[in-house]
Amino acid sequence: MAEKYWSLNHCELFERLTKEQIKRLEETSKVRPFKRGELIYLPTDAGNSVLMVASGRIKIYHITSEGKQAVLSLMEPGEIFGELAALDDNPREEFAEAMVSSSVIMIPSEALRQLAEEHASVSLGVTKLLGLRRRRIERRLKSLLFRSNRDRLIHLLLELTEKYGRQTADGVLITIKLAHQDLASIIGSTRETVTVLLGELQNERQIEVHSRQLLLRNIEKLAHSIDVPVPRVRYEEDLGNRLLRESRGGA
C-alpha cells in the first residue's frame, strides 16, 4: 500500500488530486512485480487498465513483419503507459516489457475515467499525454522515412538528452545505459550499423562512449548537423560529473 500511495502521489497526472481521491485510486489499483524480460502485456490483451511505473524501466514496442523489434518508447518511474485504455477498453496494440526488475501499478480504466469526470486536471492531463505521445511517434516516423541511419541515430541521441541528459563540464551525459541493439531497435537499424556509426562519431570527437553511457561533447553542433532545435537539458552538473567519473572508472 505504501508503494502505491507514494507512486500515485508523485505522478504528475495526479498531483492536484486530494488525499481522499488518491486513497480511492489506491484502493482500486494493484501493484505487480515483473522480472527483467517479462512481458507486462502483448497485442490483443484486454485494455482494461492504465499502468504506471512504480520502479524499474519498461519498454513499449512492436514486432515488425520481418520479426524485428521496433521500440516506441521507454517508461520510467512515475510515468503512465497503456493510456489508451482511459478512452476505451479495446485490446492492446503493442508489447510492454520490463527492461529491468520493475514494479507496475495497474489502475482500472473505469476508476481513471471517473476521476477524469470529477477533476479537470486529470482529463486535461490524459489529453496532453496522448498529444505528446502522438507528436513523439510522428517525429520518430518522419525520421525513419526521410533520414539516413546516421541522422536517425543523432536525432535519437538528442531526443534522449531531453529526458536523460545531464549537463557536465565536458558536455551532455546521457545517463541511461542502452545497448547498441536497443539503439538499433529504436531507429530501425541494425546493431552492427549502430556500432559503426557510434565509432565514427567518437572518432570525430562529437561523442564519448563509457560503459554504455554516451557523452555528447557538442550538443549544438550535433543538432545543427541534422537541422533540428537544440534540446533543453536539465542542469545538474554535480550529478552529471559524478556519473561521468564513474563511467570512466574514476573514484
Image (spheres, helix red, strand yellow):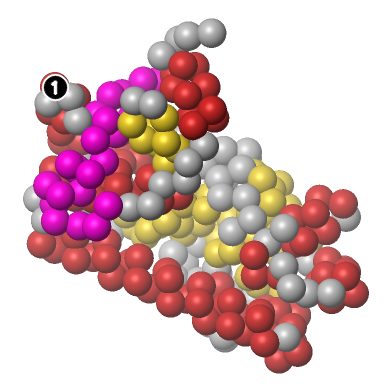
- Residue 153 appears in which quarter of the rendering? top left
Give the answer, above or below, for where 23 lies relative to 102: below
Q: Position of residue 112 (x, y in %)?
A: 70, 79
* Magenta-span inclusion, residue 77: no
- Residue 63 appears in which quarter of the rendering? bottom left
Q: Residue at x 14, y 56 (%)?
A: 227
Q: Residue at x 56, y 72 (%)?
A: 83
Q: Quadrant of the N terminus?
A: bottom right
Give the answer, above or below, for where 106 lies relative to 18: above
Q: Residue at x 49, y 17 (%)?
A: 246
Q: Position of residue 28 (x, y in %)?
A: 83, 71
Give the answer, above or below, for where 125 lies relative to 247: below
Q: Position of residue 134 (x, y in %)?
A: 38, 73
Front-most of 209 and 82? 209
* Magenta-span inclusion, residue 218: yes
The answer to whether residue 103 of the structure is visible from this angle is yes
Magenta residues, start to end? 207-230
Tell me if 15 is positioned left or right of 40 in this view: right
Q: Position of residue 77 (x, y in %)?
A: 62, 50
The answer to whether residue 212 of the structure is visible from this angle is no
Front-most of 168 and 110? 168
SS label for mark 1? helix
- Other residues around mark 1 within 10 Å, as few (<14) / some (14–19) / many (≥20): few
Q: Residue furthest bottom?
A: 117
**Residue type marked 1:** Asn
Residue highlighted by disc 1 = 203
Q: Residue at x 42, y 56 (%)?
A: 73
Give the answer, above or below, for where 217 lies relative to 190: above
Front-most of 28 and 116? 116
